[in-house]
C-alpha cells in the first residue's frame, strides 16, 4: 500500500497570505493521506495575525520547507535600471530585458535548487499554487528532474512567451479556478487540453458566526464592508469614494477588514472625504467571518481576481454582494439575483447600487438568500476537493 502513495511537493512562491493560501489549506485539510503525502515549500513563513504559516500547516500535519532567498546584489539592480533606462521608449523590449536579468540571477538558481530537492526526496509530482508567471522556476526544475507538474492558477494570469512555452512543454494539467482564468490562459496560447476548471469551494455546513459588535455604531445603522489585503489591486479607494457620493439621507457605516501597503493612504482618503467618523479600519483579523456577519452589504471592488473566496463566504452568510465585473467575480455573482455587478472603476455605478440596496432591506434579504442557495449548490468544498484530487491522482 505504501508504494501507491503519491509524494507531492507543493510549491508556493507568493509574497503574502491571501485567499489562495486559505483555499490551499482547506484542500490540505481534506486530502486523502492514504493516497498522497504532501510537503509544502514556500520562500516565506508568512505571519497570519499571531500565528505563522508553519504553525497552520503543522496543525494539519503538513511539513513546511522554507527555501533560502537571494537578495538583489548591486549589479542586478544596476542591470535592471540600465535596461529600463536604455529601452524606456519600447515597453515590451524593456520588460523582456528586465525579465532576462530575473532569469539569470533569481529564476535559474532557484530552479537548480528545486530540481535537486525533487530528485533527492523522490517526489512524484510538483503541485504549484499560484499562477505560471510566478512559478517559472518550478517548471524548469520539474523538467530537469523529470517530475510531473500540476499548476493551480488562482488569479487571471499574464504570461510572456517563455512562461507560456514552459507551461505547454512541462505541465500535465493547469487547474483554473474559474472559466475566466481558463479563457485568459487560452488567449495567451496555453494548450486547451491542459486547462481544466475547478471552482474554489467553501464549507457550506459550517455554522453562522455571531456578528462582531461595533462599539459606537447604532444597531439600526446599515453596514457596508469589504475584506481583503489593502493593496492597489483591491481598489478599496473606489469603495470609499462611492460611499462619499451617496445621497445625504444615506449614512451607512463602512467596515474595512484587512491590512496592507495602502492602509495609511486609505485612512487619509477617508479623512479627506469627510468619512473618518463613519469608517472602521479593523486591521488584520484572523477570524474575518464575524466581521462579515455584521455587514448588510459586501463589496469587492478589485481590478483582478481568480475566483474570490471572500465572495463565497459573503454568499454563505446571506450577504448581498456588489462586485466589479471581472474574471471570477462575474462567474459567482448573478446580477440582479444575488447582488450587482458593475464595470470596474465606475464609481458612480457602484454608488447607485449601494444606494439601491441601502433603500431596500427586502431586496438585501432576497439577494442574500439567493446567494446562500447558489454557494451551497455550486461551490461546495466537497466538489472542490474532489476535482483537484482527481487531477493530482491522474498526473502523479
Image: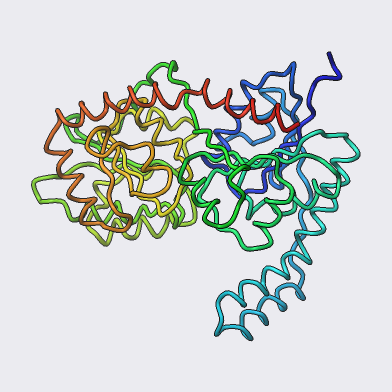
Residue most extreme to the top: 1
Q: Could you tell me residue 136's position as x and y percent?
A: 71, 54
Name the residue nearer the viewer: 320 or 395. 395
**Residue at the image position 27 percent from the left and 33 percent from the top:** 338
In the rendered view, how is the structure colored?
rainbow
**Residue at the image position 46 percent from the left and 47 percent from the top:** 305
The answer to whether residue 282 of the structure is visible from this angle is no
Q: Is residue 305 left or right of residue 97?
A: left
Name the residue nearer the viewer: 374 or 76. 374
The answer to whether residue 337 of the structure is visible from this angle is yes
> Across the whole image, how many numbered discs are drawn on residues?
0
**Residue at the image position 74 percent from the left and 29 percent from the top:** 38
Residue most extreme to the right: 120
Q: Could you tell me residue 25's position as x and y percent?
A: 60, 30
Image: 364 above or below 351: above
Q: Could you tell me residue 333's position as x and y percent?
A: 33, 37
Name the residue nearer the viewer: 37 or 3. 3
Q: Quadrant of the N terminus?
A: top right
Q: Quadrant of the C terminus?
A: top right
Q: Could you tell me residue 350's position as x and y percent?
A: 24, 50
Image: 322 above or below 205: below
**Residue at the image position 82 percent from the left and 58 percent from the top:** 109
Q: Is residue 265 left or right of residue 142?
A: left
Amino acid at each position: 500500500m505504501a508504494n501507491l502513495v503519491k509524494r507531492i511537493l507543493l510549491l508556493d512562491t507568493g509574497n503574502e497570505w491571501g485567499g489562495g493560501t486559505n483555499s490551499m489549506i482547506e484542500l490540505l485539510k481534506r486530502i486523502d493521506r492514504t493516497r498522497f503525502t504532501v510537503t509544502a515549500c514556500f520562500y516565506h513563513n508568512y505571519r497570519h495575525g499571531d500565528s505563522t504559516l508553519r504553525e497552520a500547516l503543522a496543525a494539519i500535519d503538513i511539513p513546511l520547507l522554507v527555501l533560502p532567498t537571494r537578495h538583489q546584489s548591486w549589479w542586478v539592480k544596476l542591470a535592471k535600471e540600465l535596461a529600463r533606462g536604455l529601452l524606456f521608449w519600447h515597453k515590451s523590449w524593456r520588460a523582456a530585458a528586465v525579465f532576462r536579468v530575473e532569469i539569470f540571477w533569481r529564476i535559474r538558481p532557484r530552479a537548480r535548487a528545486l530540481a535537486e530537492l525533487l530528485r533527492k526526496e523522490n517526489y512524484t509530482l510538483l503541485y504549484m499554487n499560484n499562477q505560471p508567471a510566478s512559478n517559472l522556476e518550478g517548471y524548469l526544475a520539474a523538467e530537469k528532474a523529470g517530475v510531473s507538474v500540476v499548476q493551480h492558477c488562482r488569479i487571471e494570469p499574464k504570461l510572456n512567451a517563455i512562461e507560456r512555452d514552459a507551461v505547454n512543454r512541462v505541465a500535465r494539467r493547469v487547474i483554473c479556478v474559474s472559466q475566466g482564468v481558463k479563457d485568459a490562459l487560452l488567449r495567451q496560447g496555453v494548450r486547451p487540453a491542459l486547462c481544466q476548471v475547478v471552482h474554489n469551494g467553501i464549507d457550506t455546513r459550517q455554522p453562522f458566526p455571531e456578528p462582531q459588535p461595533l462599539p459606537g455604531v447604532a444597531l439600526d445603522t446599515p453596514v457596508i464592508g469589504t475584506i481583503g489585503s489593502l493593496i492597489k489591486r483591491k481598489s478599496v479607494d473606489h469603495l470609499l469614494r462611492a460611499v462619499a457620493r451617496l445621497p445625504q439621507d444615506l449614512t451607512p457605516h463602512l467596515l474595512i477588514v484587512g491590512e496592507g501597503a495602502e492602509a495609511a493612504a486609505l485612512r487619509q482618503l477617508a479623512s479627506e472625504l469627510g468619512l473618518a467618523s463613519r469608517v472602521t479600519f479593523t486591521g488584520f483579523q484572523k477570524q474575518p467571518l464575524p466581521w462579515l456577519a455584521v455587514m448588510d452589504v459586501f463589496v469587492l471592488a478589485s481590478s483582478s481576481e481568480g475566483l474570490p473566496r471572500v465572495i463565497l463566504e459573503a454568499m454563505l452568510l446571506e450577504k448581498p454582494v456588489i462586485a466589479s465585473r471581472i474574471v471570477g467575480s462575474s462567474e459567482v455573482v448573478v446580477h440582479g439575483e444575488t447582488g450587482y455587478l458593475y464595470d470596474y472603476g465606475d464609481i458612480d455605478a457602484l454608488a447607485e447600487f449601494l444606494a439601491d440596496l441601502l433603500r431596500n432591506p427586502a431586496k438585501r434579504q432576497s439577494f442574500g438568500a439567493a446567494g446562500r442557495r447558489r454557494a451551497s449548490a455550486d461551490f461546495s468544498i466537497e466538489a472542490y476537493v474532489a476535482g483537484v484530487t482527481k487531477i493530482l491522482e491522474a498526473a502523479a
